[in-house]
Amino acid sequence: MFDDSKTENTSSSPAGAHDVADSAAQATTSTDPKSIDSINETERNGSITGIGVVLGFSLIFTGQLTLSSGTWRQFKFLALGISGAGIVFQLLALLAILSLPLISKDIHRRAYIKFIVGVVVMLIGFAAHVSIDVAVDVLKWPVP
C-alpha cells in the first residue's frame, strides 16, 4: 500500500513537466548540431543592422574629421589613427557576422566583442580629437 502511494505521487506530476522533459531530450538527441548552437535569423539581422548603423556614424565622424577646414596639424593624425583602428574592429565584426548564413553563438559572441572594442576605440579617438581641439582653440596651446 505504501508503494502504491509513491507510484501515484510520481505519476501525478504537472502536465507540462513531461513536455519540458521530452523537448529537452529531443534537443540533446538532435542530429543537427547547428540547430542547437546557432543564432536565429532575427538575432543575426539585428546584429547586422546595429553594427551597420554604428559603423555608418563612425565613418561619418571620420569623414568630417578629414574634410574639416583649416590646416592639418599633427594631432589630427593621432585622432584619425585611433578612429581608423576602431573602424577596422567594427568592420571585422560586421564581416564575421556576414560571412556565413548560419553562425554559431560562439562566433557571434566573438564578433560582438570585436564590435564593442571598435566602438570603445572609436570613442577614444573622438575624445582625443575633441580634447586636442579644446586645448588648441580654447586654452591656446602652441600648435606644432
Image (cartoon, rainbow, N blue to C red):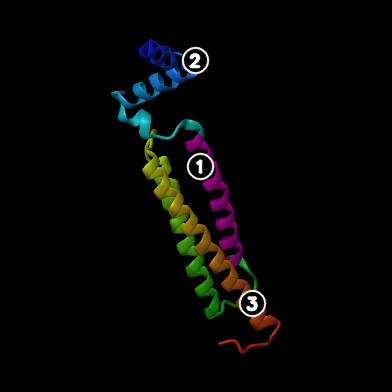
Q: Residues within 10 Å of mark 2 (few under 14, many from 20)?
A: few
Between marks 2 and 1 in the image, the one whose residue lies nearer the viewer: 2
In the drawing, what numbered circle is on residue 15?
2
Of 93 and 77, which appears nearest the observer?
A: 93
> Mark 2 or mark 3, which is nearer the start of the sequence?
2
Which quadrant of the rendered structure holds the N terminus? top left
Q: Secondary structure at mark 2?
A: helix
> Mark 1 or mark 2, which is nearer the start of the sequence?
2
Q: Residue furthest front?
A: 1
Q: CA distance from mark 2 to mark 1?
A: 38 Å
Q: Secondary structure at mark 3?
A: helix
Residue type at mark 3: give it. Answer: Asp
Q: Is residue 41 above or below residue 84?
A: above
Q: Residue furthest right?
A: 138
Residue type at mark 2: give it. Answer: Ala
In the drawing, what numbered circle is on residue 133?
3
Q: Are marks 3 and 1 in contact (CB under 8 Å)?
A: no
- Provide the residue span drawn in magenta: 43-66
